[in-house]
Image (cartoon, grey):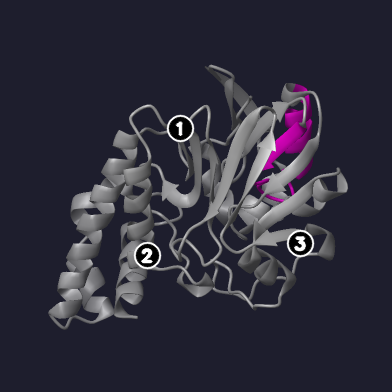
Amino acid sequence: MKLLLSSISGIAVLLLAPAALAQLPAPKTVDLGGGLHVIHGQGGNIGVSAGPDGVFVIDDQYPNSAAANLAKIQEIAGAGPRYLVNTHWHGDHAGGNATFASAGAMIFAHENVRKRLSGEVPSIGLDGKPAAISPEVAWPVLTFTQGVDFHVNDETIRVKHVSASHTDGDAMVWFVEPNVLHMGDVFFNGIFPVIDLGSGGSVRGYLAVMKETYAQVNDATRIIPGHGEVATKADLARQIAMLEGAIAAVDARIKAGDTLEKTIAARPLKPWSAFAWSFISEDSFTRTLYNGLKK
């Protein structure tokens, strides 16, 4: 089994235009040992299991990076993708669907992913604008409500839908025997997370799912976040502690009757300012928490 994922360097491209994406460096791999590899790509972390039953892939980043990612998977796995699971609908995780499907991948996802990609449920992008409908070839052809198990490459790969957190269609993927968990964007390692309230995401739900996952992993589990470096249970605990503290700090301002503007000015997230990054500033995460907690 081989596992591939993108590094934290890829998350900044969430704000870049397609022309800028095309000029970014090609994906690179780093051998983590034990059959694990990392691809430093342009979007969310990609997972791959390669073996005699074919290549199983988790997420595929942007349309502009899809061809390069396919080439990298071919280089490392010796074949193209046969199965593809989307952890959710965002373009930095499912934007390469059309290219991967055209290369022979069968796409699996929670039913809400297909609804959003197909436009059955209108979606607002993270830029606040209506999201474009994806071409039909990019839509998942097999959807699930709770989850689905794959038995390939002498492994059990367990795909499980989780309750509303990052979006309303999130799924995690557990490689059972090697004890590797891909959490999708329900885990941003070491940085403020994106909680997409416009796509059914939930502030309290996000924290609840992280806590549920923490109870299910052990110290030997390798955790693949949606963005960031490969993590441990201890890393997940630090992220949970940040989110607990941040939620409590903003909730206190809400209970005190503060407006959103007054709450932002008070800088309740100052103790966690080191978690801010190019896409999610301290102020913008305060806004997300305030709006999510006021619902």
Determine the CA span between mark 1 and mark 3.
28 Å
Return the mark for residue 287.
none
Q: Position of residue 6 (x, y in %)?
A: 57, 36
Q: Amino acid at mark 3?
A: Trp
Residue at image mark 3: 139
Q: Quadrant of residue 73?
A: top right
Disc 2 target residue: 205
Residue carrying label 1: 230
| Residue drawn at 45 percent across, 71 percent down | 197
Q: Quadrant of residue 260?
A: bottom left
Labels in figure, total: 3
Q: Residue furthest top?
A: 33
Say if 271 sits above or below 150 in the image.
below
224 w.r.t. 50: above or below: below
Measuring 65% from the left and 34% from the top, which residue is drawn there? 48
- For the C terminus, the quadrant is bottom left
Q: Quadrant of the N terminus?
A: top right
- Towards the viewer: 130 or 110: 110
Instruction: Give percent across and percent down for residue 52.
Output: 77, 25
Dot 1 crowding, Cα within 10 Å, few <14, some 14–19, many 20+: many
The kind of secondary structure element at disc 2 is helix
Reply yes or no: does residue 225 show up in magenta: no
